[in-house]
Image (cartoon, grey):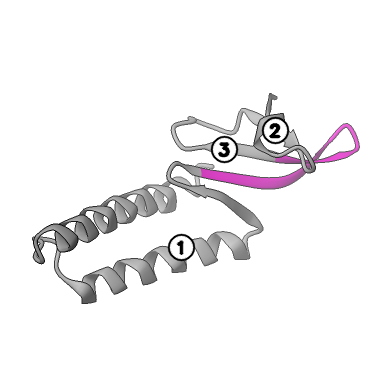
Amino acid sequence: MATLRPRIAELITLRADLAELRADLANGGSSPLGGVPEVKALEARIYAILEEFNTHDIQVKGFAPMLLDFSGELDGRPVLWCWLEGDEEIRWYHRVECGFSGRRPI
């Protein structure tokens, strides 16, 4: 998680900027964050980070809040180590077939 934190923080900032920019453009047509080109640029940066996660076998299960799963094994059974935005570290896991509702503390 330590190596991912800067990218996660960047993604959260980009997500907030994009939400504000879209709201401003929808409500008044202008924003201090820019216009349609900036929307497209933010979207491209977000997708690039998400693709980077994917290339490292990190599953993005949620975007707001961020929910990330990492493949692993526990007691000979495949599991997903689960991190939810706001967690300091990975403290949860769930069986692959159970999903978020099957989360258990490590």
Main SS, magenta region, reads strand
Task: Please tell me in which quadrant of the rendered image residue 92 appears.
Answer: top right
Kindly identify which numbered label has been placed on residue 20.
Answer: none
Tell me where residue 45 appears, x and y as whole percent.
37, 67
Residue appearing at x 57%, y 46% in the figure = 68
Residue appearing at x 48%, y 30% in the figure = 88
Left or right: where does residue 19 sit relative to residue 82? left
**Crowd around label 2: few <14 · some 14–19 · many ≥20 (10 Å):** many
Give the CA distance from mark 3 to mark 1: 17 Å
Q: Earlier in the sequence, mark 3 or mark 2?
A: 3
Give the CA distance from mark 3 to mark 2: 8 Å
Left or right: where does residue 95 sit relative to residue 100? right
Residue type at mark 1: give it.
Ile
Magenta-colored stretch includes residue 73: yes
* Quadrant position of the C terminus in the picture: top right
Left or right: where does residue 27 sit relative to residue 45? left
Q: Which residue is mark 1?
A: 49
Q: Earlier in the sequence, mark 1 or mark 2?
A: 1
**Crowd around label 1: few <14 · some 14–19 · many ≥20 (10 Å):** some
Task: Please tell me in which quadrant of the rendered image residue 97 appears.
Answer: top right
Residue appearing at x 25%, y 55% in the figure = 17
Q: Which residue is mark 3?
A: 83
**In the rendered view, would you say 60 is above or below 54?**
above
Magenta segment boundaries in residue numbering: 67-80
Task: Please tell me in which quadrant of the rendered image residue 30 appears.
Answer: bottom left
Kindly identify which numbered label has been placed on residue 93.
Answer: 2
Q: Residue furthest top?
A: 105
Q: Secondary structure at mark 3?
A: strand
Mark 3 touches mark 2? (CB < 8 Å): no
